[in-house]
Amino acid sequence: MSRYAALKEEAWKANCALPGTGLVLHTFGNVSAIDRNEGAVAIKPSGVPYAGLRIEDIVVVDLENKLLEGSLKPSSDVKTHLLLYRTFPKIGGIVHTHSRYATAWAQAIRPIPVFGTTHADFCPGEIPCTKVIADAAIRRDYEEETGKQITSAFRSRSYEETPMVLVACHGPFAWGKSAEEALYHAVMLEEIAHIALLTLQVNPRTPRLKKTLLQKHFQRKHGPDAYYGQMQAGTKGGKQ
Ligand SMILES: [Zn+2]
C-alpha cells in the first residue's frame, strides 16, 4: 500500500470531477493536492485524458519537484503548483483550468470587479489579474515564474480571503484547504466571471458594489462572527 494512497485518491477524485464541472476540454486543466506532513504533492499526469485516468496514474512529487511516486510525467504546470504551495502555507489543493469566462477576463488582462453579492460571498474585493509575464521570465523557467506572477499579485491581499486569480493572457487558478474546496472555488470563479461579463453587457457603466453590501456579504460567510449556512464560525468555503 502506497504511503501516499489517501493523497493520490484526493487528487484523483478532484481531477475526475473536473470534466463534469464544464471547466475543461480534452486534457486541459489539472488539480493537485498536498500532504503537508509528508511534504508530498499529488498531481495529474501530463496529457492523460480524464476519462481513462486511474489512481495509479497520479504522480507524487516533493515540494522541489523530485519524483516520489509514479511512472508518468507530472502535469507541465507542476512547478506553478509547487511555488504556490511553498508560498501559501495554508492551501491544500490547487485547480488550474482554461475555463471560458475566467480565461476571457485573463486574456483581456482585467481583474474582475465586484458588481454584486455573489462575488462578495467569496472574495472581499476584485479578483486580481497578474501582470503579463516578462520575456526574461519566460526564458528562465516559465512555469515557476508563472507562480511568481501569481504570488506577486497577493503581496497586498490575503490568499485565504481571495482563493482565486487570473494569470494574464492565460487563465485562472483557484485554491482551497483541499482539492475539493479548490474545485468549488474554480467553479465559483467561472460563475463570477460569467455574471460580471453579462452585467457589463446589460450596463457597461454598472457601478461597483457599495462597500457596506460587500462587507456584509463577505463577513457573514467568512468573518469572525460568520453566521451563514450550517458551518462553524470562521470557516471558509460554505456551500450555497
Ligand atoms: Zn494553462
Image: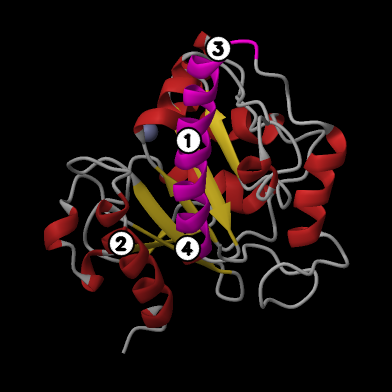
Q: First in sequence: mark 1 or mark 4? A: 1
Mark nearest the camera among 4 and 2 is 2
Q: First in sequence: mark 4 or mark 2? A: 2
Residue type at mark 2?
A: Ala
Residue type at mark 1?
A: Pro
* Circle 2 crowding by C-alpha within 10 Å: few under 14, some 14–19, many from 20: some
Residue 98 in view here: no
Residue to which mark 3 is pinned: 134
Residue to which mark 2 is pinned: 17
Q: How far across and down, in percent of the image, does residue 11 sit?
A: 38, 66
Residue type at mark 4?
A: Ala
Residue 179, numbered label: 4
Which residues are drawn in magenta? Answer: 181-205
Q: How far across and down, in percent of the image, does residue 47 sit?
A: 20, 44
* Circle 4 crowding by C-alpha within 10 Å: few under 14, some 14–19, many from 20: many
Residue 190 painted magenta = yes
**Mark 3 residue CB less than 8 A from any atom of ligand 1:** no
Direction front: furthest residue: 202
Residue to which mark 1 is pinned: 172
On screen, residue 144 above or below 51: above
Q: Secondary structure at mark 4?
A: helix
Mark nearest the camera among 1 and 3 is 1
Q: CA distance from mark 1 to mark 3?
A: 18 Å
Q: How far across and down, in percent of the image, does residue 58 sit?
A: 29, 64
Q: First in sequence: mark 1 or mark 2? A: 2
Residue type at mark 3?
A: Ala
Q: Residue at x 39, y 54 (%)?
A: 31
Q: CA distance from mark 1 to mark 4?
A: 15 Å
Direction left: furthest residue: 52
Q: Residue at x 42, y 21 (%)?
A: 104
